Image (cartoon, grey):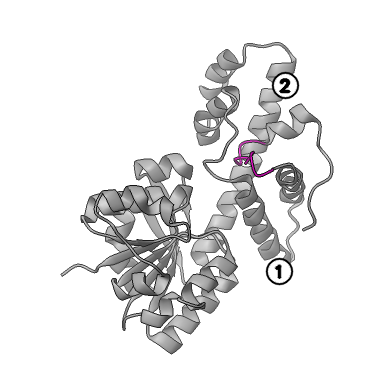
Amino acid sequence: MSDRIAFIGLGIMGEAMASNLLEARGELSVFNRSPEKAAKLEARGAKVCASPAEAAADAEIICLCLSNDNAVKDVLFGEGGVVQNLRYNSLIIDFSTISPSMSREFAAALKHDYKAAFIDAPVSGGDIGAKQGTLTIMAGGDPSDFERARSVFEAIGKSATLAGPVGAGQLTKAVNQIVVSITVAAMTEGLMLAEKAGLDVVKTLEIIRGGAAGSWTLDNYAPRVVAGDLGPGFHARNMLKDLRIAIGEADDLGLPLPVSELLKSLYTALCAHENPDVEFGNHALIELYRKGFMTGGVKD
């Protein structure tokens, strides 16, 4: 008999991932702080739970896709949290991007106090990959737990790799986010030069995508930028959070990352100019160049 699954956290990524799981499994329990985000899944047969604890009572595998360390901690251990109804030998798969040290802390507490397993499994591929079920999953945990999670990974992603023990998935995601953010910045400056020089930007993109500059970023983000769509598939504020994690890990190793530090300052400035009516995706750095707010920002 296969494990029953619950999914907690139905943001841009989580809702799409849960949708693919529901399609593959035929049943799913879900929880989100804003219950209206679960309406589409409920209409397709998912059970909407009133709390993380209720979701945990319905499942042997509990998936999380949340915004940060504190959100994961609260869902697991807070009032109405998962641990209140956690079954013996349950498996928690955390698709959130959080700090490696917190992943290790959560795993140790769950194993010691609740006899439950934990895998950190951050993903890459953005909202497009989440919708299409083609995410890349970078996992940290015990090999036997990874095998138990394989059917979940196969429902939401094109590849899943065990990078090492708990925390290794988050460290791999930190590496990923450094490369992604720098690639977005390179795309931004290239597009600005094409724009200011009076080139046909669409034609320029067609040309350079066929050469050494070709990348996932150019294929997926550049068309959005050209079309004026700077809203989130992946939030700029989450990229800022991820860069802070990566730089923090590098600092602990005594490793300077000057370009990443620059990108952190750029995303800080970008996020400082968000408002309730305008949210930026991580591909929206071009706003810094077009609007001239290259300095300033929020306090780290």
Disc 1: which residue? 252
**Count of marks overlaid on the render:** 2
Q: Residue at x 31, y 75 (%)?
A: 57
Disc 1 or 2, which lies upstream in sequence? 2
- Quick one: quadrant of the N terminus? bottom left
Image side of residue 156 versus residue 94, left or right:
left
- Residue 137: image quadrant is bottom left
Q: Residue at x 29, y 65 (%)?
A: 5
Please say if 212 is above or below 30: above
Image side of residue 45 versus residue 210, left or right:
left
- Please state which amino acid type lies under the numbered disc 2: Leu
Disc 1 is placed on an element classified as helix
Q: Position of residue 215 (x, y in %)?
A: 53, 33
Q: Is residue 183 magenta?
A: no
Q: Is residue 283 magenta?
A: yes
- Residue 194: image quadrant is top right
**Is residue 156 visible from the viewing direction of this image?**
no
Disc 2: which residue? 193
Q: Residue at x 52, y 41 (%)?
A: 233
- Please state which amino acid type lies under the numbered disc 1: Asp
Q: The magenta stretch spans which residues?
A: 275-284
Please say if 272 is above or below 164: above
Q: Position of residue 216 (x, y in %)?
A: 50, 35
Q: Residue at x 36, y 68 (%)?
A: 62
Main SS of residues in magenta: loop
Q: Mark 1 or 2, which is nearer the eye?
A: 2
